[in-house]
Amino acid sequence: MNKNVHLFSRSTNRRSFLKNGTVAAGAATVGAGLLGKEFPAFAQGDSLTRGDAAILRFLQALETIEADLWKQYAELGGATNQGISPIDLKDQNGDPVVTGLAPLYVAGLVLLDGDMPQYIVDNTDDEFSHASFLRNYLQSKGQPTVDLNKDFANLPPSKVSGVPQTGRLTNLTELTVDTSWWTRYRSDSENPDLDPAFKFDNAIPTLAVNKHTAIPRTDKDLMADASQPGGVGLHTQAIAFTAGFHFGFIEQGGSSLYPSLAQRVSNVEALRILLSIGPTETAHFQTWHDKAGNALQITDVDTGFPGSTGATVSFPNLNDPHATTTQADELQTNLIMPEPTFFLNKQFGPVSIVRPTETENAAMNAVKGLTADGLFIGQTPQFFELLQDLAADADRARREL
C-alpha cells in the first residue's frame, strides 16, 4: 500500500485522454495537468465552472466505488422477497442485482438488527442512484465523466455459491477498519477540524489492525452452530459484525465529504446537488451507527479458511457496567446522536455538528482514508494515480463571488 501511496506524487499531462465526454481510465487518466494551477470557480449561468465539474467528477468516482462495495454486501447479505413486495434491485446501469445469496451471513447480520438486510438493499440502491445521477448530470453539461468499471473492475468477487463471478473495484476481504468515528462523534471536547493531530480511540481496536474480511469469501466461511444465537457460528458472526462497523466507516466519510466540498462550489445548482445528496449519506451513517452497537461480545481468529489472514477480532461489551464514566461516554451504544463539541472557535461553546467539515484537502483525505481501509488492495498503480489526480483537481476548486 505504501508503494501505491508513492504513486500519488506523480504529475503527468493527460489532456489527450478526454474522449466523447468520458475520461478514459486504464493507463490513460485525467489528472491535475488537465486543470493546471489553482483556479477560481466562477459561475456562469447554467454552465459549470471547471472547479464545480472537478468536484462533481470526483464525487461521481467515489459514488461508483461505493456502488461497487455496496453491491457486494447486497449480493451476500441483502433482503430478498420478504412477503411484502419483491426486491427489485437494479444497479446504476439498470442491470438486476441478485441479493441474499448467503443465508447464514444474513442471519449474522440480523443479530445486529432484524431490518439489516432491507437497509443494506436500500443503501445499495441509494448509492447506485448517486453514481448514475452524477454521471448523467455531468454529461448533460458536456463535462467529462469517469468510467472506473471499464478498466479497473478486475478484483475477484466472493466465491460463495451463486455470486456472479464478475470483476470488482473494491476488496472487502482484507480490511483494516478505522472505528474511531465512534468516539469522535461522542466527544464533547475534541473536533478534528480544530485539532487534526488528536487521536480518537477505536471502538473496536482489533479491527483497526491487521486484515479482516467483511464478507464470506467462500461457502466455508458460512458456519452454522445451534448453540449460538440465531444458529450462526462465531466465525460467521464475526464477519457480519465486521461488516456492521465497516458500514459506519464508509457512510461517515460521505457525511463529512459533501459539506466539505460544498464550500468550494460556485454554481448554485451544483451546490444544490451537494446539499441534497450529502444528507442521505448522513441518514445512512446514523442507521449503521445505531445497528453496529448491537454486536455481541465475541472473539474469532481467522484461520483455517480459504483466504484466511490470521487476524484476531474481538467485539467487546461496549456497555461494560464496570467502565469508568469517561469510557462509558465514549462507548455507550445508544449515544448515536452527535454530541455537542467545539466548532470554529471554542469561545462559541459546544454545538452538535457533522465532523470533520474542514474543506482543505477534503478530497485527498477521503482517498487516503479509503486506501488505508484496504478497499483497494490488489488494484493497479493506474487506479491509484487516477483517484489521486481526481482528488487533486477537486481540492483545487475555489469559490469566488
Image (tube, rainbow, N blue to C red):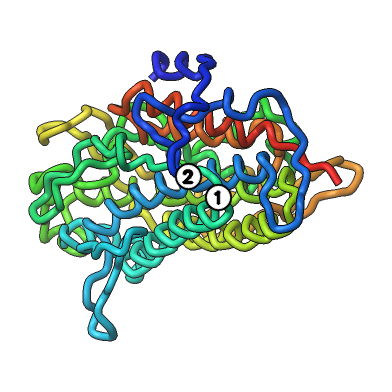
Residue positioned 86% across, 40% down in the render: 345
Q: Quadrant of the N terminus?
A: top left
Q: Earlier in the sequence, mark 1 or mark 2?
A: 2
* Image x and y of residue 110, in percent: 29, 64
Residue 195 in sight: yes
Q: Is residue 83 above or below residue 74?
A: below
Closest to the observer, 42 or 393 = 42
Tag shown at residue 321: none
Residue positioned 70% across, 38% down in the render: 359
Residue positioned 30% across, 40% down in the render: 150
Residue 249 in sight: no
Q: Residues within 10 Å of mark 2 (few under 14, many from 20)?
A: some
* Image x and y of residue 211, in percent: 31, 30
* Image x and y of residue 380, in percent: 32, 24
Tag shown at residue 21: 2
* Residue 42 picture quarter: top right
Mark 1 → mark 2, Cα distance in angstroms = 6 Å
* Image x and y of residue 365, in percent: 57, 32
Instruction: Say what amino acid the circle numbered 2 marks.
Output: Gly
The residue that disc 1 covers is 142
Residue positioned 76% across, 51% down in the render: 44
Closest to the observer, 30 or 102 = 30
